[in-house]
Image: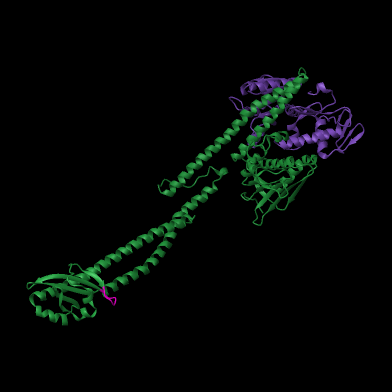
């Protein structure tokens, strides 16, 4: 069964089902009640007729004959010990004599059908009189009772679908009105993004459900704001606590190298310590950059993506020249986004550096900025490297992940380049995916669809 | 030249003091802002190195109080914080320059030289080094009578090294001053290395005396002196 995803529709359907059940139950109740009542009327009629006949039998047996011929009771018969003494013409006409066997009196009315489909109500009793034991049977047709009941059924059948349809429509409208404030809350909550966490939904002291929902949302926002604040504080503290010892190591080492008493071996050692310190310092900076992007503590202003890419290409072209590679930048679209200049540039820098690093000598690296027919902007970095195995396509963006631990270290970096690129792109509302290039190699595709564009 | 170092991390303060002294400066350390104030009011100084994160009074506080009292000595702020607000705050409050920790010592020296020189007649830099001559007007470098075929970037790099001849040039300095980039990154280091290697190929490879040297873990230097004095 398909579950409707729309709450409004689901609410209406549930409401409709409950309504149909109620209406059916109610109609059935009315129908059976009316039926019972009408049958009761027929039965009362039969009992009245019966007492008329027994009255004649007791006090005026001769009048009974007249009653059967000219009276208002259309169907009756009187039997004595199984043989019929008296029966009306109609009784014989519809063949009741054949249907109702003698001596069946059970003192309770019941219904039968004649061979020509006439419905009749039958009532038999035993009546002791004049030392004999008579059996009297009275019948009454059910035509008027049936007609009334059928009319009622027809009315129910006509009114039920109409009323259900009307109720469903009203239910749908009501559901819409009930859900409208929730949609409003959702829209407002969506607008409260990471850089606007101090904003709150409007809420008052009332205890209705929607107000409580807004209050719960606000509490969540408050907690989020607090943890973002803590993360920022942590980043600031960590940067101080990590940089201070690094500064000390550097200063001490560099000062020591300046002492003429420092011999050549010692210089080598200190130089090596300083190199590692420098690498550690860069890793710390990279982690701080990541943490800054994570906590959205970015300073955004409009950036022309094409210009930035061209600048990055120019910046790293010397590395490509060393490997006799060619970098092609195909700019087929203009794109201006709100971005943190340093962080976004770092992402592009890392992606191009990665492409240069893993592409063979004399190959071509293609960067293209374009839009798809829907107008969404993309930026592709396509290299001619060995490509990335399917199983590692996701992991390659993990922090400190290395595709091939033996090889990568010699190419520098701490395995943070792509992680920084991904985090930086995502902090700007973009998405980065890794695809296989048609001729081998990898394509890092940045989708800027989630990014608020600036201007045309 | 007397320099006051206000820094609460005594290892950093001592290392900087020793380094400055080996450069011929006279250096005094102070561990707190109050101590720094006391030193400034009792002795004359030509420059102050001020750490921003100090116990007790914050470095910025001290800087503002200092300027309010009319002290005009150049102040180089050392900070572990690198967000833009902090930088603006530092310069607005009367700092003349700042360095982000962990700084490279050669850069500290270069900044100090620059601040001490400020306001005085700029000496015309010596644009020759051994048999290498730079012509800033034509952007040509000539070594041993031979014109070197340098790219724009390579010339800028050589120009920078020659201007700082005898002193060490760190990667940070090159990043800031040649590539105009605020933060360092692995790609940038690779770019610097490639450019230095190319420059060396053109400037040093054809000649017996090597002018450009790499100092492990510190940076580069252009010098005509022999190997043993390279660090100075």
- Quarter assignment of residue B47: top right
Which quadrant of the rendered structure holds the C terminus of chain A?
A: bottom right
How many numbered callouts? 0
Q: Residue furthest top?
A: A261
Q: Look at the picture and state if A238 lies above or below A40.
A: above
Indicate the position of residue B84 as horizontal and vertical percent values: 65, 37
- Quarter assignment of residue A388: top right
Left or right, A214 with respect to A58, comes to right
Indicate the position of residue B66 as horizontal and vertical percent values: 65, 27
Left or right, A186 with respect to A382, comes to left
Along the viewing direction, whichever of A258 and A266 lies nearer the viewer: A266
Chain letter tied to green? A
What residue lies at 29% left-to-right and 77% top-to-bottom?
Answer: A116
Indicate the position of residue A373 as horizontal and vertical percent values: 66, 57
Indicate the position of residue A159 as horizontal and vertical percent values: 37, 68
**Magenta residues, as a range?**
A113-119
Q: Quick check: can you spot residue A92? A: yes
Q: Colour of chain B?
A: purple
Q: Look at the picture and state if B140 lies above or below A192.
A: above
Q: Look at the picture and state if B85 lies above or below A185.
A: above
What residue lies at 74% left-to-right and 38% top-to-bottom?
Answer: B180
What residue lies at 13% left-to-right and 82% top-to-bottom?
Answer: A66
The rendered magenta stretch, by its main secondary structure, is classed as loop
């Amino acid at each position: 069964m398909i579950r409707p995803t729309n709450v409004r529709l689901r609410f209406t359907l549930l409401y409709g089902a409950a309504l149909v059940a109620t209406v059916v139950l109610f109609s059935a109740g009315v129908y059976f009640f009316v039926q019972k009542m009408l049958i009761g009327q027929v039965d009362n009629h039969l009992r009245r007729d019966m007492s008329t006949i027994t009255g004649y039998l007791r006090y005026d047996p001769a009048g009974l004959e007249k009653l059967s011929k000219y009276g208002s009771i259309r169907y009756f018969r009187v039997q004595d010990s199984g043989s019929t003494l008296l029966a009306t013409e109609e009784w014989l006409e519809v063949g009741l004599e054949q249907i109702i066997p003698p001596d069946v009196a059970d003192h309770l009315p019941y219904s039968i059908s004649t061979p020509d489909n006439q419905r009749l109500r039958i009532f038999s009793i035993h009546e002791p009189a004049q030392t004999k034991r008579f059996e009297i049977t009275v019948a009454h047709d059910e035509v008027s009772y049936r007609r009334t009941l059928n009319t009622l059924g027809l009315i129910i059948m006509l009114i039920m679908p109409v009323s259900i349809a009307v109720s469903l429509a009203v239910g749908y409208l009501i559901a819409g009105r009930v859900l409208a404030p929730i949609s409003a809350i959702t829209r407002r909550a969506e607008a409260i993004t990471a850089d606007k966490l101090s904003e709150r939904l409007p809420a008052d002291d009332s205890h209705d459900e929607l107000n409580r929902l807004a209050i719960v949302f606000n509490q969540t926002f408050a907690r989020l704001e607090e943890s973002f604040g803590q993360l920022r504080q942590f980043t600031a503290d960590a940067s101080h606590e990590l940089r201070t010892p690094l500064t000390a190591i550097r200063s001490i080492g560099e000062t020591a190298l300046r002492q003429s008493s420092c011999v050549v071996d010692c210089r080598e050692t200190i130089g090596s310590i300083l190199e590692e310190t420098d690498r550690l310092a860069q890793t710390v900076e990279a982690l701080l950059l990541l943490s800054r992007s994570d906590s959205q503590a970015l300073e955004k202003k409009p950036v022309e993506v094409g210009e930035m890419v061209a600048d990055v290409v120019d910046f790293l072209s010397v590395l490509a020249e060393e490997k006799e590679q060619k970098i092609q930048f195909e700019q087929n679209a203009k794109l201006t986004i709100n971005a943190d200049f340093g962080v976004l540039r770092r992402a592009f820098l890392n992606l191009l550096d990665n492409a240069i690093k893993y592409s063979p000598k004399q190959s071509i690296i293609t960067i293209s900025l374009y839009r798809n027919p829907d107008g969404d902007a993309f930026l592709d970095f396509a290299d001619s490297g060995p490509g990335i195995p399917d199983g590692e396509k996701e992991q390659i963006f993990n922090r400190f992940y290395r595709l091939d631990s033996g090889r990568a270290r010699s190419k520098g970096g701490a395995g943070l380049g792509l992680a920084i690129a991904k985090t930086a792109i995502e902090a700007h509302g973009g998405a980065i995916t890794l695809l296989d290039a048609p001729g081998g190699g990898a394509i890092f595709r940045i989708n800027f669809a989630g990014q608020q564009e600036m201007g045309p | 030249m007397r320099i006051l170092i206000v820094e609460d991390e005594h290892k950093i303060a001592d290392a900087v003091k020793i380094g400055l002294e080996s450069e011929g400066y006279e250096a005094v350390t102070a561990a707190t802002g109050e101590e720094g104030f006391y030193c400034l009011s009792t002795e004359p100084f030509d420059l102050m190195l001020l750490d921003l994160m100090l116990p007790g009074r914050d470095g910025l506080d001290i800087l503002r109080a200092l300027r309010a009292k009319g002290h005009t000595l150049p102040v180089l702020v050392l900070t572990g914080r690198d967000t833009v607000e902090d930088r603006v705050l530092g310069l607005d409050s009367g700092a003349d320059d700042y360095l982000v920790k962990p700084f490279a010592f050669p850069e500290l020296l270069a900044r100090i030289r620059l601040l001490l020189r400020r306001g005085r007649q700029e000496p015309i830099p010596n644009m020759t080094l051994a048999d290498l001559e730079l012509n800033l007007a034509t952007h040509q470098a000539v070594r041993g009578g031979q014109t070197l075929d340098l790219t724009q970037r390579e010339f800028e790099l050589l120009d920078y090294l020659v201007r700082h001849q005898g002193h060490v040039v760190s990667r940070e300095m090159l990043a800031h001053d040649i590539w105009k980039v605020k933060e360092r990154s692995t790609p940038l280091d690779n770019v610097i290395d490639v450019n230095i290697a190319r420059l060396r190929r053109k400037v040093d490879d054809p000649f017996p005396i090597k002018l450009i040297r790499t100092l492990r873990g510190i940076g580069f230097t252009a010098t005509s002196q022999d190997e043993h004095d390279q660090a100075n």
